[in-house]
Amino acid sequence: MAPASRLLALWALAAVALPGSGEEGDGGWRPGGPGAVAEEERCTVERRADLTYAEFVQQYAFVRPVILQGLTDNSRFRALCSRERLLASFGDRVVRLSTANTYSYQKVDLPFQEYVEQLLHPQDPTSLGNDTLYFFGDNNFTEWASLFRYYSPPPFGLLGTAPAYSFGIAGAGSGVPFHWHGPGYSEVIYGRKVLYFPDRWWHATLNLDTSVFISTFLG
């Protein structure tokens, strides 16, 4: 069990500030609408916009999380992740949903459009994680490759690892309780949540708005 000092709740690690409004600004996902979760005033995770690779390895890669800013330009990928474009490109694709408990026990397959239009809504705060289904991981990389090829992952890798993507879309108030896994990055395309996390760092996630996000696991 990790010491208490290593338990990290990812409540609101960063707001992604990008220009535009309406369909261009929020991608049609309507962040900040009914069901959005209030952001806590203080975040203790350090933010770095001028980090070198040497500093990343020495100060963060193996010991603590960090919010990385301005390392990549994913404006093209972000535009392709709007609600309208994803439904047009992938609406009939079958996706696998997972329950939001720590080990994602239950799996449900259904068309992506059905998930977005019928199940993607704010989470009732009294609901349990195993009562909530959301789209994260279990992606068919071949079917989603036309989208993923436009994504630019954070440039800082770790020796002996290779990146693996996990794409997701989830409603406000959803998330996963405390858990850990290998190192990687979680970047929000629409919504609020972005972070590098070290290996075996205990953390929980909470989507404050309807969120479109992609994680890059280094394994």
Image: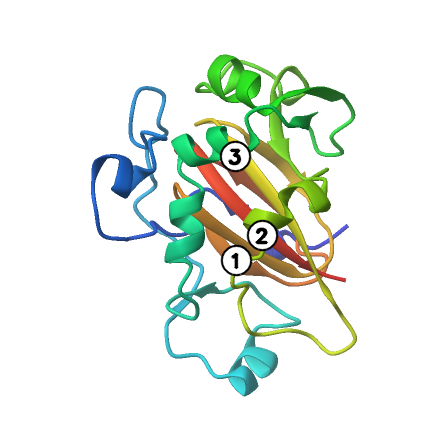
How packed mark 2 is, by other alpha carbons closer than 10 Å (few <14, some 14-19, many 20 or more), is some
Residue under pointer 1: 151
Residue type at the position of mark 2: Phe
Question: In percent of the image, x 64 and y 60: which residue is there?
Answer: 184
Q: 10 and 174: which one is in front?
A: 174
Q: Can residue 8 be seen at all in this image of the molecule? A: no
Residue 89 marker = 3
Q: Establish if 101 lies above or below 195.
A: above
C-alpha gap between disc 2 and disc 1: 5 Å
C-alpha gap between disc 2 and disc 3: 13 Å
Please give left or right for residue 108 compared with residue 4 in the image.
right
Q: 18 and 84: which one is in front?
A: 84
Residue 136 in the image: state x and y as whole percent. 63, 36
Residue type at the position of mark 3: Ser
Residue under pointer 2: 148
Q: How many marks?
A: 3
Q: Quadrant of residue 216?
A: bottom right
Callout in the foreground (1, 3): 3
Question: In percent of the image, x 68 and y 61: which residue is there?
Answer: 183
Q: Earlier in the sequence, mark 2 or mark 3?
A: 3
